Amino acid sequence: MGIYLAEKENFSTFVAQNQYIIIMKKIFLTAFVALMATVSVCAQHEDGDLLYQPRVGITLSTLSGMDDAKMKVNVTYGVECEYFFDDDFSIAGGVLFTDQGAKFNQTDGDYTMKIYYAAFPFTLNYYVLPGLALKAGVQPAYRVKAQMVVGSEKVDFDRAVDVLLGDEGAKMNKFDLAIPVGLSYEYNHITLDARYNFGITKLFSDSDDTVRNQVVAVTLGYKF
């Protein structure tokens, strides 16, 4: 009787272990199939592919060289075109409309500097994995307008400088140059892009200050 019970217990243990192995095999098989499905829907681009991508997202901007400048959240949108040399390398260029600048907290009140640009980013992209790209490039931009916002009041920045300081005041540059560095991930034609724009040009001309735009941009796009 004791031998029978021992054999029965060993058999039950054997069955339980095999069931565990079967379950683990099913889990690994399911994970493998899901991974293959993910890779299959990730972009597999070829030599000569030309894709267009509308993009919309946010920017987190501030101004370096100004101790009292605080980060503010803005909106950005535009379109990008990407050409593939092969499945690993591509070049992209486009136009983005961005609201940049910074917030300031002063003893006499808070105000916001809003600087609107039409930016033209150009990047070289290296796909380290299907859908996952590292990118770096150059982004010239043209300033459309600049405003100082105090409460509900909006004042044109250039006009305010002219009135307050005249010809002796430092002028805000119309041209801005930045170096964008970042990465993107494409899944089923939808692309999440994150990049940091290192400001190169000074914000103000005729000034010893080294105030520059510093921007983090995160956008969603759809490639077709």
Image (cartoon, grey):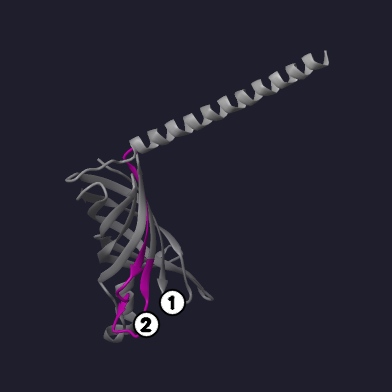
> As displayed, is residue 201 above or below residue 57?
below
**Res. 112 in view:** no
Tell me, yes or no, whether the highlighted magenta stretch contains residue 205.
Answer: yes
> Would you say the residues marked 2 and 1 are in contact, meaning their CB atoms lie under 8 Å apart?
yes
Q: Which mark is residue 222?
A: none
Observer-nearest of 164 and 71: 71
Q: What segment carries the magenta color?
A: 188-214
Q: Residue furthest right?
A: 1
- The residue sitting at 77% across, 19% down in the picture is 6
Percent of width and height locating residue 113: 39, 68
Q: Which mark is residue 209?
A: 2
The amino acid beneath tag 2 is: Asp
Percent of width and height locating residue 222: 30, 42
> As displayed, is residue 58 above or below residue 4?
below
Count up the numbered dots.
2
- The residue sitting at 27% across, 69% down in the picture is 177
Q: Which residue is mark 1?
A: 66
Q: Is residue 1 left or right of residue 33?
A: right
**Crowd class of label 1 (few under 14; some 14 to 19; many from 20; radius 10 Å):** some
Tell me, yes or no, whether the highlighted magenta stretch contains residue 223.
Answer: no
The amino acid beneath tag 1 is: Met
- The residue sitting at 58% across, 27% down in the picture is 21
> As displayed, is residue 4 above or below residue 166?
above
Percent of width and height locating residue 81: 22, 50
Secondary element at tag 2: loop
- The residue sitting at 34% across, 35% down in the picture is 40
Q: Is residue 28 left or right of residue 123?
A: right
